[in-house]
Image (cartoon, helix red, strand yellow):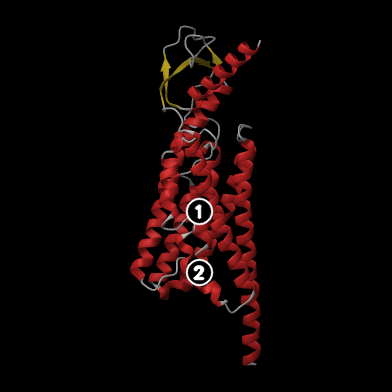
Amino acid sequence: MYNQLHSATILEQDLQRTFFKCRKWQLEQTLDPINCPYHYYCNSHYPGDYPSWVDTIVIFIAAFSFFAATAAMIAGVVGGSRPPEPPWLTKFNRFRRYFLPSGPILLPIIVVVIAKGNRVNTLFGLAQTGPSILQMVRASALSFETKTESDIKYVSLEVSTMSGILQAALYLDSIILPYYTGLDALESSRFSGECLSCICREQALVVGGTVVYRGWSVTTAMVVGALTLRMFTRLAPETKRKTMPMKIAIESISWILMIVESLYLLVVLPPERSWSRAISFSAVFVLICLQIIRRLISLVFGFCNGNQENKGRL
């Protein structure tokens, strides 16, 4: 009995690995157009997963990125609630960009991790948690403005951040699209018995399945657009008054879209590794809440300072 259960478990694992790692589904001419209008089989799949120690490193990188962003958020909340800015916070802000998920050190590492993410699946599946990592990078880029004295250095940092976000989104799609396609093939098909991955379907198999989430999306475009406007305002300060309403609107829409995406992924995705997905997106919500608190505190103190200046003039 034990051997039968063990063999069944191994077969199920091999089946899931075949479906979730499939790079190309081949449509084959069907012999039964009534009961099997579309007959597919996996023609190419990704190699096996990395060992567990690689996943452990990825978990450490993701956790360090989150705690670095959280520390920067909390420092911003504390600094905003006690103006003027404390000396320790001034020193912290000078070096924080190097430790942020969207900074020049961690962002390239995150891009490399996501680029190799198809084989990171032993302990920490990027198909489930990769979107939350991209959300963390985008939230970090929107929350913290790059502060440098040199415009050349500022532009190079901003351009590298935008390039990193776009690359991470593109690489993430190379992970989630095969996963979602295989998930749809596994759930809404029946096995024909011709081979391990041979399936019969009533409808054609669509790349990405029924899940509409994409890393390369409107949200990513909005975030990059907000960063572009931020850079344009820095280089052309005389246009700040004209571009500021557009910049605020695009940033607000970006935050709303990220919240909607996170809720959608929590509800729609299958229960596989739900604990890691729940933890990762809960961490993203923590960052978003801290950013909202930070913005509210800045608005309150800006309003109070404005009233004091008006009273002084009177």
Q: Residue furthest bottom?
A: 314
Which residue is painted at 60% across and 47% down in the image?
Answer: 260
Q: Is residue 181 above or below residue 285?
A: above
Which residue matches tag 2?
Answer: 93
Q: Is residue 221 above or below residue 170?
A: below
* Residue 32 appears in view: yes
Residue 291 locus on image (x, y percent):
60, 61
Residue type pointed to by label 2: Asn
* Residue 298 appears in view: no
Observer-side mark, 1 or 2, equals 2
Choose top left, top right, bottom left or bottom right for residue 46: top left
Which residue is painted at 60% across and 16% down in the image?
Answer: 6
The total of numbered circles placed on residues is 2
Residue type pointed to by label 1: Arg
Residue 97 locus on image (x, y percent):
46, 63
Looking at the figure, which quarter contains the N terminus? top right
Q: Are marks 1 and 2 in contact (CB under 8 Å)?
A: no
10 Å neighbourhood of mark 1: few (<14), some, or many (≥20)?
many
The answer for how far apart the CA atoms under marks 1 and 2 are is: 19 Å
Which residue matches tag 1?
Answer: 138
Residue 101 locus on image (x, y percent):
49, 55
Q: Residue furthest left?
A: 152
Q: Residue furthest top?
A: 31
- Where disc 1 sits, the SS reads helix
Q: Which mark is residue 65?
A: none
10 Å neighbourhood of mark 2: few (<14), some, or many (≥20)?
some
Which residue is painted at 47% across and 39% down in the image?
Answer: 54
Between 53 and 191, the one nearer to me in the picture: 53
Residue 95 locus on image (x, y percent):
46, 66
Q: Is residue 92 above or below residue 195?
A: below
